[in-house]
Every structure is written in C-alpha cells, then in structure tokens.
Image: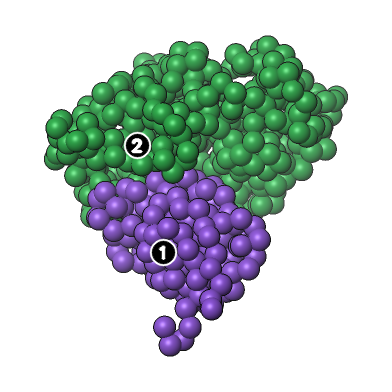
Amino acid sequence: MLSGESGEADRFAMSVITRMAKAVGASRLISIEQAHLDACALMSDSSLEFIQHIVENGGRVRVPTTLNMVSLDLDAWRTLGVPEDFGNKATRIAEAYKRLGAVPTWTCAPYQVFSSPRFGQQIAWGESNAVAYANSVLGARTNRYGDYMDVCAAITGRVPYYGLHCEAERAATYLVKVEGVNPGAWSHTASWATLGHLLGQEIGSGIPAVEGLPRAVVSDQLKALLAAAASSGGIALCHLVGITPEAPSAKAALHGKRPERTIRVGPEELRASWEDLSSASEGDRVDAVILGCPHSSYHEFETMIQFVDAMGGASVSSHVQLLVISNAPMVALARRNGWIEKLQAFGAILVHDTCPFHSPIVARDARTIATDSGKCAYYAPGELGVQVAFGTTRECLLAAVRGQVVREEIQWSM
Amino acid sequence: MEHVTAAHVIVGGNAEGELVKSTSPISFWGGVDPLSGLIIDRRHDRCGDSIVGSIFAFPEEIGSSTASAVLVELVRNGHAPAAIITCKVPTVLALGTIIADELYHSSVPIFSVDQASFDSLVDGSRLRISEKGEIEAVGDQG
C-alpha cells in the first residue's frame, strides 16, 4: 500500500499509519477488524477536502465500518433552521463518507444500534463515549482515535500496536470504592452520569476500577457513566467490578498490582459532582431541554413516554425548545409504538443523525438549558454559551412543561 | 556562543519563530480558534494570545481527539504555529501535522523536551530549531 501501487488513497492512509507508529514509538502494526469513524462529524474546509481527496482517489474501507454523527439532521435540517451553505457542505461530507463504503449509521452510540465488537477484538473507533463503551463494556480493544486516524485505520485495516491494544496497558491504576449510597439512587441514569463526571475529574485519562455498584445494570446506565467520564476526563477504559468483562474482581482489573491511588466515593462526593454539573438555580427560566446525549435508545424513549403519559395531557411550554436526539434506527423502532407521534404531540422536536454540538439547532438566544446528560452538561457552557440545569429525565420533562428549572433532590444517602 | 538544547523529534522539520510559552496544558479543540489561531480557552494562561507563526511551547496536550483536525485547518488557512514544543508526546497533534503534510504538503514540526529544558525556555525569545531537534536562541541581528 505504501508504494502507491494500490492507489493514492491507500498510500495516503498507510503513510499516516506508519508515520504515527514512529511518532508513538510502536514497533509494529496490527490488523483491526472493525472501525467507527468520528471524522464525518467535523465541519471545516479541510475536513471536506480530506475526505474528497480520499474518495476521489478510490478510497474504500477494508473492514466493517460505521459512522458517527454528521453536522445536521439529513432529513429535516432546513426545517430546523440550519443555514443553507452549512447544510450543503455537511451534506457533501456525509455523501463522501458513504462512498467510502461505511454504513451510514450517523450515531454516537453505534454499540446500541449496529456494531457489537467481540471481547478481545482489535478495533479502531473514534468518538470518546463509544471508545469508552467498546473498551469497558464489550472488552474490545481500541485507543481514542483522533481525526483522521480513524479513517486511515479503516482504509488500511491496520493500526500501530500501542496503548489499549496491548493487554498489559489495560490494567486499572486507580481503585474507586463507592460506599454508603442508597441503592435506589441508581435507578436514574443521571446518577450514573454524576459518577462518571466525578471519575473523569478525579482520574483524568487514567484507568479506574470501580467497586460497590449494583450488579443489575442496563446499557443506558453504562452509556451515561462512560460518556460523562470521557468528557470531564479522557477516560477510554473504566473497569466496573462485577459488571464489565475484564473486572470479575478488583484484583483482576488491577492485574494483581496495587493501585496508585484509592478514591472513596459516597453520597457527599456524588452530591458535589451533581452540583458541579449544574450552574442554573431552581426556578430559573429554561429555554431549551436536550435529551439524547449520547443518542437516545429505545428504552430511553420508553422512559420519556412513561413520564409524558403520567403528566396527563400537559405539553411543552411555548418558549421552550425540547430537543430529543437519536439515530434513524431507534426512531424507526420508537415509531412502531406511536412514540414519535406522541412526543411530537407533546411538543418535542425529534432530531436524528446529529447533535446540538455539531449542528446549530439550539436557539441562538438560549441562555439556560436543562439536560439529563453529564456529557451535554459538561460541554454546553463552553460550546453553546448557556448555563445548565442538570437533572433526571423526569426533571427535564417537567422543566420543558413549566418553562423553568425543576429540582427534586436525589436521595443519595441510605 | 548560544546555548543549544537537544529536543526529541516527534515530527521533524526546521522552524524559526518567537516563543509563546504556556504553563497550562491545552486542548486545541475548544482551546484554539481554527480560523484565527487565537487561544480561546478562558481557563488557559495565554488566552487571547496568537500562536500564528510562533514556536508554541506547552507542557502537554489534553482533551478532545478532534484537536488533530483543528491543527489541519490551521495549516490549511495559514494560521498554524511554526513549531510545537511539549514535555509529553502529543499524539493527537502529531497526527494532525502528519495529515496536514500528506494533504497540503505543509506541516508543523513537533518536538518534546525534558522538564528542565522546558523550564529554561524564555517566553518571547526568538528560537531556531533544526530538523535534528537542536533548539537555539537567535539574536536580534539573526
């Protein structure tokens, strides 16, 4: 490939891979069996020129490859008020990534809709929350691949052998003991995001082993925790003792070594982490509510519908934008139960393929948003210039109806 | 004679420019404006300063892996720094400069130095860096 015999796209991609191997000090390359590309979410002249250079020179992926979000809802962007030139450029980027041979999943939660890597499988994924999920929950092996390494890996099917691809580099170096927390608190996905936010802040880009969590956990809770941990920190692998496959015990997750640091987390620390995610006060006017970061799953739609039903005919306040973000497969499943129509009748705006950080869909004059996502709460002040009311899904839906921040204390203590 | 500091070459190239030295780690995504080359992270000690054409030294890269794409865009529009010096190997920025080199045949050399060498760098001084990683101060007369 490096010689250019199989074309310029292959030469380009293999040159990047081998030069990166040298930069990180890797002595050899290994094969990967799957890729998830984040680069399609970028909006700049160079991101378009990069992928055009690749596809116009015959670039094709060599392994099954899924795609992260694009910069707009490909069906409804005009009605969402996205400017014409922005929409056209993003559409050209999306088309180029399809020509590459990747599956147009357009989602940041590929592990819930399409691709499920096996335990121990070597893969190359972009998108921080997906990387953390693949490594931690599925036990597949990937580094956090930056743009456009993900694309080059998919084209060549090769990556430098370093970091989390190597068994020895996957050992936990921190032990986190969760103690004294009311088991009922874990029924809210926002509680898992709260713990994730704390882990990212305490540990940075290290690898924690967390013990003391309930064993019966659903995918959405793990998604919330890992997305938050990969936002406030650079966590790419988080062992949850008794839950994730490389952590049957804390000792196993630590590879038999002593932790560099032990961190104790109780109700006080979780309460503080929750406060840290929330800058708005109870009663503040809410302009937008964002649910679905990462993209809403079937069960998260189900939860929203239960709360909407329980509100007995109430609807979203006229000055609030309620954005429910997901991907096309989940929206199709939810539609089968009439949930999409019900959410729209409630006043929600359904968005797929994208998110508020990549597409200009939140009203420009919005000053306060409510969200149940730790990741969204972390990025929104800087990226959207808003203050945030972080809360449970129910609090967010109530805020959408009342048009103001609603807080119902979580009972963290036993 | 000028003092010469030996740096580890991560991505090679010659460079000359004024040193913009920072004591804070930085994420180019959210930290540097890809269109202007200004530091925009409000928590960063050099917020508001320009890195265009400079030798930009900072302890380590942090944050988003989209930082590589920001560096590619800076190279594309002519607002990239002349070189980058860090203490820890910045793998995401190394990727960005390699991509820029392949795509636009223009790159930002990246070097790493030990803490003592980093501490000895003087903000605002004019430096020349060779392909082999020899960093030396350049007098006003050149």
- Percent across and percent down for residue B113 are 56, 56
Mark toward the viewer: 2 or 1: 1
Would residue A179 appear left or right of A393 to someone viewing this image? right
Q: Amino acid at mark 1?
A: Ser
What chain does badge 2 belong to? A
Residue at screen point 48% across, 83% down: B139
| Front in this rendered view, residue B82 or A404 | B82
From the image, tell me which residue sits under label 1: B130
From the image, tell me which residue sits under label 2: A17
- Quadrant of residue A258 in the image? top right
The hue used for chain B is purple
Q: Residues within 10 Å of mark 1 (few under 14, many from 20)?
A: some
Which chain does the green colour mark?
Answer: A
| Front in this rendered view, residue B24 or A91 | B24
- Quadrant of residue A295 in the image? top left
Badge 2 marks a residue whose secondary structure is helix
